[in-house]
Image (tube, rainbow, N blue to C red):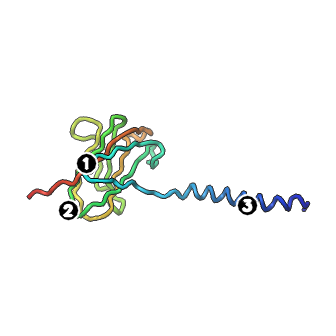
Amino acid sequence: MPKSCKYLIVPLSLFAVCLSSLGAYAQVQQYQPIALPQFGKEFKDTLSNKDIPTGDGGFARDYLVHLNAGDQVVIEVKSDSFDTIVTLLAPNGSTVGENDDGPDGTTNSLLFARIVKAGRYIVRVRAFGGKGEGGPFTVKVTRLQPEK
């Protein structure tokens, strides 16, 4: 082996290791839903193509909320930019409920749910039709008071 090749092997090897570790870093992006700051208060956000791919051409944005057994909640999602869908996912990943269009005749979403088991739930916001649509929206989770 020529002497000049020996001097290239180490730098090229280091370069290859760095490139492979950069690829691994990009693939290990952790899933971290956004914690909803407060019950009963609208939270403004934006759905974009940088959010979670849904597999059907659209994207979703997830929010974390802790709910107690016996809670009755209303989840509202409103947008003038896209037709919203809201899904409530249980701690085990199963769907508790989903709503596309609320009763007011708009494309906003309104979901009522009764919580059976306490835990960390996910409120998922996405656009109907999965066409990559998105834009600004608000999400609000309200605990209803039980009847006395």
Give the number of the mark in front: 1 or 3. 3
Please give the residue where the numbered disc 3 appears in the rendered image.
14
Q: CA distance from mark 2 to mark 1?
A: 16 Å
Residue type at mark 3?
Leu
Residue type at mark 1?
Leu
Residue type at mark 2?
Gly
Question: Of the residues under marks 1 and 3, which one precedes in the sequence?
Answer: 3
**91 displayed left or right of 104:** right
Q: Nearer the viewer, residue 96 or 109?
A: 109
Asked whether disc 1 touches disc 3, contact meaning CB atoms under 8 Å apart, the reply is no
> The C terminus appears in which quarter of the rendering?
bottom left
Residue 71, horizontal then vertical, whole percent: 21, 59
**88 displayed left or right of 6:** left
Q: Residues within 10 Å of mark 3 (few under 14, many from 20)?
A: few
Residue 38, horizontal then vertical, whole percent: 29, 53
**Which residue: 67% across, 56% down?**
19
Q: CA distance from mark 3 to mark 2?
A: 57 Å
> Residue 116, located in which quarter of the rendered image?
bottom left
Please give the residue where the numbered disc 2 appears in the rendered image.
70
Residue 40, horizontal then vertical, whole percent: 24, 50
Please give the residue where the numbered disc 1 appears in the rendered image.
111
> Residue 14, located in which quarter of the rendered image?
bottom right
Q: CA distance from mark 1 to mark 3?
A: 54 Å
Q: Describe the element under mark 2 as helix, strand or loop.
A: loop
Q: Describe the element under mark 3 as helix, strand or loop.
A: helix
> Residue 105, located in which quarter of the rendered image?
top left
